Image (cartoon, grey):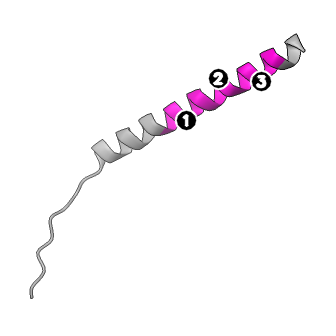
Amino acid sequence: MSAMNQSANNFRTMLALNNRLTMVCYGVVAKSAKYVCTEEAA
C-alpha cells in the first residue's frame, strides 16, 4: 500500500506541475502577442 500511495502522490505532483507549466506558457504567449487596433469603416 505504501508503494501505491507514493506512486499516486508522484502522479498528482506531476499533474500539478504540468498544470502550472501550462498556465505559465499561456501567460508568456499572451504577453508576447501583438494586438493590432483596427478601425471599422462604418
Viewer-nearest residue: 3 or 33: 3
Residue position marked by numbered label 1 in the rendering: 19
Give the number of the mark in front: 3 or 1.
Answer: 3
Toward the right, the furthest residue is 1
Q: Which residues are magenta?
A: 5-22
Q: How many angstroms separate mark 2 from mark 1 (CA)?
A: 10 Å
Q: Secondary structure at mark 2?
A: helix
Q: Indicate yes or no whether the magenta region holds residue 25.
A: no
| Cβ–Cβ under 8 Å for marks 2 and 3 | no
Q: Could you say where residue 13 lies in the image, as x and y percent from the top left?
A: 64, 23
Between the C-alphas of marks 3 and 1, the distance is 17 Å
**Where is residue 23 drawn, in percent x and y?**
45, 38
- Residue wearing tag 2: 13
Vertical relation: 21 (above or below) 37: above
Q: Which residue is mark 3?
A: 8
Bin the neighbour count of mark 2 within 10 Å (Cα to Cα): few under 14, some 14-19, many 20 and up.
Answer: few
The residues bearing labels 2 and 3 have C-alpha atoms spaced at a distance of 9 Å
- Image quadrant of residue 15? top right
Which sits earlier in the primary sequence, circle 3 or circle 1? 3
Q: At label 3, which amino acid type do we have?
A: Ala
Q: Indicate which disc residue 1 carries.
A: none
Q: Is residue 1 left or right of residue 20?
A: right
Q: Amino acid at mark 1?
A: Asn
Q: Earlier in the sequence, mark 2 or mark 1?
A: 2
SS at circle 1: helix
Q: Quadrant of residue 10?
A: top right
User: Residue at 86% of width from left, 19% of height from top?
Assistant: 4
Say if 7 sits above or below 30 in the image: above
